[in-house]
Structure formats: structure tokens, C-alpha cells
């Protein structure tokens, strides 16, 4: 991309979420899933937001989804795409779409995980249009 | 349905300026209070309940209540961002009905314009310990980019256009031209709005509300007190509030909490949307008004674009007059929180004290709705139904 890409801000991991951010540094994308009701949710938490069970666990996410909605912060420096991506596992998560032509995006487009390093070195789960290639 | 014991809005005051470089926040709080007291014909010593938001500096209500030297027996600092003050009206009526206070003061004051902050395009400064922070802050969440996602999804699902959204701003400008205090008084056209610079696609600069200093105050009082005052009687006859979040990642961002708070408040009032000819709707962005119109039931879901087009919200032109002071889009958005000025203009309309060019004739019912927070992320809708007796 000709233009500089926005560097994500740091998250603030808590004891509840450290495993997610540690796995992300190793290139793994975890999703929280409830063993009681079987449903995945976002954002990850110990308490299942659907059935209120505390019996939840991390599962390996597929890293695939589709754009539910997005907006293009064209006046930010550098510009970036804010988005909600509906994960293949079910829930919809906030993220950024990277490696893309912001004006060519469409709701419903298939996207895939593309970790980006934050200011402090956390691996932040962003997404890019599917098929862009693994070389970026 | 039997109406619950209710209360009256006896005083309503909007600070006149849109820039206060030489006033403290506390001075603005004091001027707002004094304005509302003078409007109602009450004394400071009559106030025994105080409602404020986090725009009042200090721990909850304590510092400003002490600065104003109020003698209180009830306080409430419910904070749902811009809809706080709309909710405060309902909570004040509930407190009065419960015998906890007789005269409740609600204040708002802020100086974001003087302080050079509160641009909707800046990243939020939330508490890093709030559980959603780490899942949103890294991605540059700002007010405009999540409202932008709502607009984008609404366009995708319902074919809503930038030109339709522009009509919301056009209507606001038609009203603001008659408001000598409005920040922007110039008429704008659909083309000017839709061709103004894109800030965050699909939202243009003129889809966004203004940034202003200022504020206002309301006095909600017990019925016996209201009837002894010389002002027209404006009574709260229905209210409801509805926080809406992300529901664990299963959500529809084209539906707001107003779909819950609107029908509940109208049912409590015993009226329907068809009875309403004036509404104050917190217009943080043009899309926010469209969403509220649909969710409150003024039109079917997805038909908001057609409803607002061709002057649908202009007083004397459309079916429903909306924000006849010029709203947040043209007039005022003090402290970046629109829920206070919305109530004030509804009171003016019910008293027959709006500008003659925008006054809805023989108005006896008004609806107020505010959505505070971020429409596409988590927010609280607050609905009031007010009646002129």
C-alpha cells in the first residue's frame, strides 16, 4: 500500500483476557465459547452473555468472516477502515479492515484475519479482504 | 391505562451563547440554574432535588451542589451520555411521586468549543478497565466512525441515500434561520449537504452536529407547585429508557433502543405516534434522527429516508415538525450532550413560545427522544411524552 497504515492502539489486557493476547502474539486467534449452551460470543468474557454460565472456554477461531458494516475514516492521519465483521463462528466483532481499497469495500465481502502489531507490540486482530494473499 | 402520578416541567432555560471562553463550568451551571428559576418564578431555596451528569465537575453532584449552595434531600447522577438529562426528567418525576423531593433542578453545562476538545473524530478516552475497552480502543473507535457504520448498514439494508440523510440537516437549517442564538443560521440545500466533504464515509461534514459551549437547566416540580406558578402547564405523561448493547455479538445496528423506549413511553401516556405533531429528536448525526423516527414508529423500519425527504421534518411543511430550534445540527450541542436542549425546545413548543415561524399551532402533545452513547456500539435511548394542560 502506498499510504502508511494506521498502527492499532494497545489493548489493556486483564487477567480475564491475557490468554487471548498471549495466543495472538503466537499467531493464534481465540474465540470464547460456552460449554453449557454451545454458543460463541464476542467480545470474549468468562460469563456467557447468552446463558449466564461461567463454564466458558477458548476455542481456535477460523479467522474467517464477512463485513457486517464499515466506515472509512478518510480524514484521519493515516486514514483507516472501522468495521464490524461477522465471524464464521457466529458473533460479530469490531475490527479494522486492512490491505484494502477502502472505496471498493462492500458489506458482505469475505474477509480473513490479518494480525497487526500495536504501538506496544500486541497482536491486534484485524481483517483483510479474502484472497489478498499471505505476503503482506 | 391509568397514568402514573406525574410532575410538571415548570422552568426551562438555555444559555444564550455558543462560546464561553471566559466562564468557568461552575459559573455556567449557576447561570443555567438562575435562568430556569427566573423562567419558573421559583427561588433557589425551593430546590430540594438535584440531577446532573459528569459535565458537572466533581464527585457526582457534590461539588456543584455545594458551589450552588443547594439544600437537598435527593440527588441523582445517572449518566447515559447525551440522553442523561432526558432520563433525569423522568427520574425527577419518579422521585417527586415517591415524595423524595418537590422541586428538582437538572443542569448541563460544558465548554468543549473553548477547550478545543470533543471532536467526534477523536478517539474516545474511556476507562481502560471497562471490559469493552481492549476490544474497541485498538481499532480507533471514535464517535463518528461507529455512527458511520450505522449509516452504512442502513443504506445497505434499506437503500437509504446521502440525499435523504441531507434532508434532516436541511430541515434543521430551515428552523435555525429563525433562531437568533443558533450557531449556524444559513439555509443549506440537499446538494450542499451531500457535497460537503466526507469526514467518515458515508457521513459528510454537514451530517454532523455542531460543537458548542453552553448548557441549560430544567425545573421539574410537584403538581401542586406547578399550578401555583404563572407559567403554562407542561406535564410529563409518559417516559421510558432503554439501554442497548452488543448482546454478545448478536446485534442489528439498524435498530436502536428507541424501539423499546418509544412504544413504552407512548403506552404509558395513552397516546400513539399519530397523535404527535412535534418531536425533539437528539440529532447527533443525520442518521440518528432517521433511526429514531423509524424506531419510535413515525414510519415503518427502513422508510425513514422517504419520511424526511422533501421537507418532512420542517414545521408547517411536513407531517411532523422536528427540532424547531435548529437542533444539534445547526443550533446548539452544549457539552457534546444533546438531551437537555431537546427538552427545552419541546417545552417552548408546548407553551406556544417557539419562534412564530416554527411554532406548531395549538400543540398539546410533544415527544422527546435522545440517544446517548454510540448508536452502533452501546447506547441508551430515553423517551418523554409531554402534554400541555
Image (cartoon, rainbow, N blue to C red):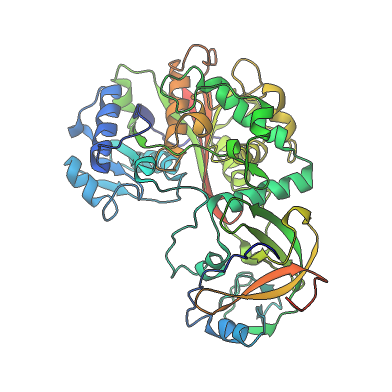
Q: Position of residue B330 (x, y in %)?
A: 51, 29
Toward the front, the furthest residue is: A2
Query: In the visual, does B187 lie left or right of A1?
Result: left
Which quarter of the picture shows residue B22? Answer: top left
Which quarter of the picture shows residue B267? Answer: top right
The mark total stands at 0
Query: In the visual, does A2 lie left or right of B343?
Result: right
Which quarter of the picture shows residue B32? Answer: top left
Residue B361, can we see it? yes
Q: Position of residue B42 (x, y in %)?
A: 24, 26
Is residue B53 positioned above or below A62 on the image?
A: above
Residue at image position (61%, 57%) is: A79
Is residue A117 positioned above or below B58 on the image?
A: below
Residue B304, can we see it? no
Q: Position of residue B123 (x, y in %)?
A: 50, 57
User: Is A8 or B351 nearer to us in this picture?
Assistant: A8
User: Is B121 or B291 nearer to us in this picture?
Assistant: B121
- Quadrant, the C terminus of chain B: top left
- Quadrant, the N terminus of chain B: top right
User: Is A86 or A57 nearer to us in this picture?
Assistant: A86
User: Is B16 or B356 nearer to us in this picture?
Assistant: B16
Q: Position of residue B108 (x, y in %)?
A: 35, 40
Amino acid at each position: 500500500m502506498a499510504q502508511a497504515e494506521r498502527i492499532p492502539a494497545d489493548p489493556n489486557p486483564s487477567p480475564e483476557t491475557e490468554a487471548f493476547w498471549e495466543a495472538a502474539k503466537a499467531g493464534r486467534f481465540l474465540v470464547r465459547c460456552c460449554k453449557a449452551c454451545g454458543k460463541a460470543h464476542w467480545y470474549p468474557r468468562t460469563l456467557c452473555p447468552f446463558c449466564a454460565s461461567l463454564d466458558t472456554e477458548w476455542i481456535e477461531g477460523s479467522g474467517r468472516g464477512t463485513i457486517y458494516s464499515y466506515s472509512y475514516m478518510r480524514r484521519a492521519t493515516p486514514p483507516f477502515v472501522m468495521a464490524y465483521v461477522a465471524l464464521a463462528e457466529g458473533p460479530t466483532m469490531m475490527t479494522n479492515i486492512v490491505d484494502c481499497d477502502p472505496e471498493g469495500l462492500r458489506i458482505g465481502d469475505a474477509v480473513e484475519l490479518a494480525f497487526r502489531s500495536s504501538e506496544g507490540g500486541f497482536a491486534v486482530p484485524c481483517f483483510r479482504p479474502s484472497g489478498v494473499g499471505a505476503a503482506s | 391505562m391509568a397514568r402514573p402520578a406525574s410532575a410538571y416541567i415548570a422552568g426551562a432555560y438555555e444559555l444564550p451563547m455558543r462560546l464561553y471562553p471566559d466562564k468557568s463550568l461552575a459559573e455556567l451551571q449557576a447561570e443555567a440554574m438562575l435562568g430556569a428559576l427566573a423562567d419558573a418564578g421559583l427561588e433557589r431555596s425551593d430546590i430540594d432535588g438535584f440531577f446532573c451528569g459528569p459535565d458537572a465537575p466533581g464527585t457526582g453532584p457534590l461539588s456543584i451542589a455545594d458551589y450552588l449552595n443547594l439544600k437537598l434531600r435527593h440527588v441523582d447522577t445517572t449518566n447515559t451520555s447525551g440522553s442523561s438529562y432526558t432520563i433525569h426528567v423522568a427520574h425527577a418525576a419518579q422521585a417527586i411521586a415517591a415524595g423524595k423531593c418537590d422541586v428538582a433542578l437538572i443542569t448541563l453545562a460544558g465548554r468543549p468549543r473553548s477547550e478545543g476538545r470533543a471532536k467526534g473524530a477523536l478517539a474516545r478516552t474511556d476507562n481502560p478497565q471497562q471490559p469493552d475497552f481492549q476490544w474497541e480502543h485498538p481499532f480507533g473507535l471514535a464517535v463518528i466512525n461507529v455512527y458511520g457504520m450505522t449509516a452504512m448498514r442502513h443504506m445497505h439494508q434499506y437503500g437509504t441515500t446521502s440525499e435523504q440523510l441531507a434532508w434532516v440537516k436541511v430541515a434543521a437549517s430551515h428552523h435555525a434561520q429563525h433562531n437568533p442564538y443558533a450557531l449556524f443560521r444559513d439555509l443549506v440545500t440537499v446538494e450542499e449537504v451531500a457535497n460537503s466533504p466526507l469526514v467518515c464515509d458515508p457521513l459528510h461534514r454537514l451530517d454532523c452536529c455542531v460543537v458548542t459551549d453552553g448548557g441549560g437547566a430544567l425545573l421539574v416540580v410537584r403538581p401542586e407547585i406547578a399550578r401555583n406558578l404563572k407559567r403554562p402547564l407542561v406535564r410529563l405523561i409518559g417516559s421510558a429508557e432503554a439501554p442497548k448493547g452488543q448482546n454478545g455479538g448478536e446485534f442489528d445496528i439498524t435498530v436502536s433502543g428507541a424501539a423499546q423506549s418509544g412504544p413504552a413511553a407512548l403506552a404509558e401516556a395513552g397516546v400513539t405516534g399519530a397523535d404527535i405533531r412535534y418531536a425533539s429528536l437528539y440529532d447527533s448525526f443525520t442518521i440518528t434522527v432517521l433511526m429514531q423516527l423509524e424506531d419510535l414508529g413515525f414510519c415503518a423500519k427502513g422508510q425513514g429516508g422517504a419520511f424526511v425527504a422533501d421537507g418532512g421534518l420542517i414545521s408547517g411543511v411536513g407531517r411532523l415538525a422536528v427540532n424547531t430550534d435548529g437542533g444539534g445540527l445547526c443550533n446548539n450541542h452544549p457539552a457534546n450532550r444533546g438531551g437537555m436542549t431537546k427538552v427545552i425546545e419541546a417545552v417552548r413548543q408546548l407553551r406556544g413560545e417557539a419562534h412564530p415561524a416554527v411554532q406548531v399551532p395549538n400543540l398539546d402533545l410533544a415527544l422527546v427522544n435522545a440517544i446517548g452513547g454510540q448508536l452502533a456500539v452501546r447506547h441508551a435511548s430515553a423517551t418523554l411524552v409531554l402534554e400541555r394542560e
